[in-house]
Amino acid sequence: LRYFSNLYLLNRKEQEQRIEKILEQVDLADLAETYSKGMIQRLQIARGLINDPEILFMDEPTVGLDPIGARMLRNIIRCLKQEGRTVLLTTHYLPEAEELCDRMVIINKGKIVAHGTPAEIKHGYETLEEAYVDLIKEASK
């Protein structure tokens, strides 16, 4: 985290404050030397937050996290949204996308096949997964 905060040119005081806050947010403050795969994933999330970004890109962010870590991350994403930040999230886990996203884009083979709110995309289907499968099938014809 110090390495990446240096890349973002944060001063020493700001580095220490941000690192402490972020390690607490991702619940890693006491575990520096014994990281599991999930902890490493959480540390990567912390790294992405170190420069206090206005726009955050997250690619499959809950992969490798246990249910507690995944919940924690979803809460962080909600907090970022409440602060007015933009989070671009890529995921195949549609219930999570539906829970977190204000707007969605479904892409198949590099082409946008649907975009809108989760409710707009799901319209006429019982679940977002059903809509997704149907949209992908239709786009693949």
Image (cartoon, rainbow, N blue to C red):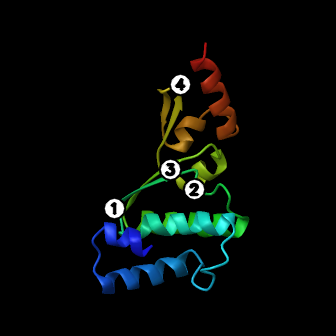
Picture layout, residue 126 above or below residue 68:
above
The CA span between labels 3 and 2 is 8 Å
Query: Which label was assigned to residue 94?
Result: none
Residue 86, quarter of picture: bottom left
Q: Which residue is drawn at 33% across and 62% down?
A: 54
Q: What residue type is labelled 1?
A: Glu
Query: Which label was assigned to residue 61?
Result: 2
Q: Which of marks 1 and 4 is nearer the N terminus?
A: 1
Which numbered mark, 3 or 2, is in the foreground of this view? Answer: 2
Q: Where is residue 70 in the image (x, y as percent from the top left)?
A: 65, 63
Q: Which of marks 2 and 1 is nearer the N terminus?
A: 1
Front-lying residue, 3 or 28: 3
Front-lying residue, 60 or 2: 2
Crowd class of label 1 (few under 14; some 14 to 19; many from 20; radius 10 Å): few
The CA span between labels 1 and 3 is 14 Å
Q: Which amino acid does label 3 sit on?
A: Leu
Crowd class of label 3 (few under 14; some 14 to 19; many from 20; radius 10 Å): some
The CA span between labels 4 and 2 is 22 Å
Q: Residue at x 49, y 69 (%)?
A: 46
Residue marked by disc 1: 54
The CA span between labels 4 and 3 is 18 Å
The CA span between labels 1 and 4 is 29 Å
Crowd class of label 4 (few under 14; some 14 to 19; many from 20; radius 10 Å): few
Residue marked by disc 4: 109
Q: Residue at x 59, y 80 (%)?
A: 32
Picture layout, residue 140 above or below residue 91:
above
Query: Which label was assigned to residue 89?
Result: 3
Residue 138, quarter of picture: top right
